[in-house]
Amino acid sequence: MNTILNDGDGIRTAGAYPVLECHKVSKAFDGVRAVDEVTLSCRPGAITALIGPNGAGKTTLFNLLSGTLQADSGDVVFKQQSIRGLPQWKLARNGIGRLFQDVRVFERLSVLDNVLVAAAGPASGSIADALFRRSKISREQRVLVDRARTYLADVGLLEAEGRPAGTLSFGQQKLLALCRLLAQQNELLLLDEPGAGVAPAMRELLGNVIRTLARKGCAILMIEHDMELVKGLAEYTISMVNGRVVASGPTAAFLNQAAARRAAAGL
Amino acid sequence: MTYLAHVINMICFYALLGTSLNLAVGYGGLLSLCQAAFYGFGAYATALIMMRSGYSLFQALPLAMVLTMAFAFIAGTLLTRLRGDSFVLATLAVQLIVSSVLYNWTDVTHGPYGVSLPRVISVADTALDVPEGYAIVTITLTTVTLLMVWRIVNSPFGRSLRAVRDDERSASALGLQADRFRLTAFAASGGLAAIPGSLYLGYTTYIDPTSFHLSESIVILTVVILGGAGSFWGPMIGALIVVLAPEGLRFLPLSSAATANLRQILYGCLLIGLMRYRRQGVIGEYDFE
């Protein structure tokens, strides 16, 4: 067991140090609490599913964790340091990666360039480098291109490396977006509905990539509506309703309880 | 031969102006309407350095480029935080401010009377007072500048800049500081515009504010959009069309004043046609929404 989950009543802990700790984080829009005192944490190598109906505050929580939004109260601690107020690009460089629900690949860039942008990270270059340090850049690029091609091969997109990313199918674009996260070598991944809109065969491939990322020690927090995917991937599940965490636990037990409740209610 | 050399010089000036603007518009997604302001700033800076320090054109050019880049950086610090229509309107304001300063700061710019160079440009004691001789200088500097830009756009910086252009939020999620890339592209774009500014000054040996109006910014934008924004060769194709197409008007039985107005109408029609039928230009990567 290597995830801490907290539904507000108490923290269940096990395994290694948590890479992410979220303490009573809240965010309101026009007086409506989209995220209401959410507390949770994630440990390296664990996949945690975040489930709940539309409007439960899951994506808002992701926006708070990734620096797109700033919380009204509470604190988020990543690698034992508060990340409150830090912009998204700084958090990304610190090791928080994000897969968007609508994918957001760089459509006019080639598939390979998409991965290279992620692989380069902080070494994303300057004009001075481009003009005066060509040989250094060439050496670095050769290494990055080799790495990027390995990741593309892992997700089956190597043959498409020269194509503009916008010409890929939606499922392939999701794979490419995951491939960028592979290249980025994050310690925490926030995946917003990785299985949505993807054909079953490709969903299996996506699942394998997510498992690979977790095996490499990455903590994964994943919003997902597909319960089969949740059952197949996540060790822990957190349920949110109206901005609050209402239940959490090991996925198998959690889903069994939910099924039992539905059966008892005659649903 | 002199006429042909003149046309070559003009194509090079517009290719340089288009290439400089393409860095901001095509690669950075920053639709700017103030390129003529940087072009003019570079030209006036070169003239003032030459007149006050006695430097040659080729000594003054790098200094003017640095000054123009610094000016574009300061303007960009404010502007590149804006997005979409707000950014476009703010660049329009910069253009109008610079035009106004060129007209009214008469102690420095001599206002509408303009600035004349005290001597013709020469290289190794050879006066370049004919278009043929000057074309060699123009072509050489154009080639060097294009090589520099080619290196920039095909570097990791260029790739990251295009990523920011395509999807700023996604780029930020991958660790790219979008504002830094936008500002750098805007400042570099302005600094590069000083090169055709200096060259134009050396070619005509006289400049006045009329050459750096908003209408000139629109012509430069036409060069970029016509050839294809976000394509390295696009501004070259755009410059060829923008310089050569009005040359056909010379053969019409019209006064020179009417021809000048027709030129503007022709550019306007070209822009409207492009936006309607081919927003990515002849060979562009980036199209306008």
Image (cartoon, coloured by chain):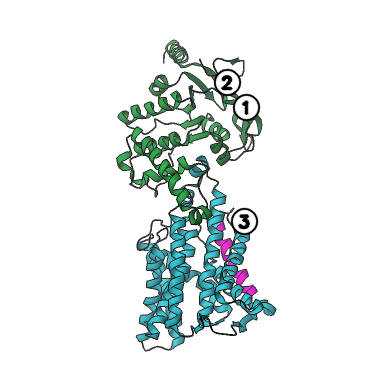
- Which disc number belongs to residue B77? 3
Magenta run includes residue A233? no
Contact (Cβ within 8 Å) of mark 2 with mark 1 = yes
Q: Which residue lies under the disc numbered 1?
A: A80
Identify which amino acid the numbered label 2 is placed on.
Tyr
Residue at (62%, 38%) from the top-left corner? A86
In primary-sequence order, the first of circles 2 and 1 is 2
Q: Residues within 10 Å of mark 3 (few under 14, many from 20)?
A: some
Measured in 3D between alpha carbons, the distance from the residue under mark 2 to the one under mark 1, in whole angstroms, is 9 Å
Q: Position of residue B106 (x, y in %)?
A: 68, 79
Display colour for chain B: cyan
The picture places residue A64, in percent across and down from the top left corner, at 58, 34
* Colour green maps to chain: A
Confirm whether the magenta stretch covers residue B90: yes
> In this orientation, does residue B67 appear?
yes
Q: Which residue is mark 2?
A: A17
Labels 2 and 3 in the same subunit? no
Task: Report the chain holding disc 2.
Answer: A
Q: Amino acid at mark 3?
A: Thr
Residue B178, placed above or below residue A252: below
Residue A33 in the image: state x and y as whole percent. 61, 31
Question: In this view, which residue lies farthest toward the right?
Answer: B107
Q: CA distance from mark 2 to mark 3?
A: 41 Å
Q: How far apart, in angstroms, are the residues tagged by discs 1 and 3?
A: 34 Å
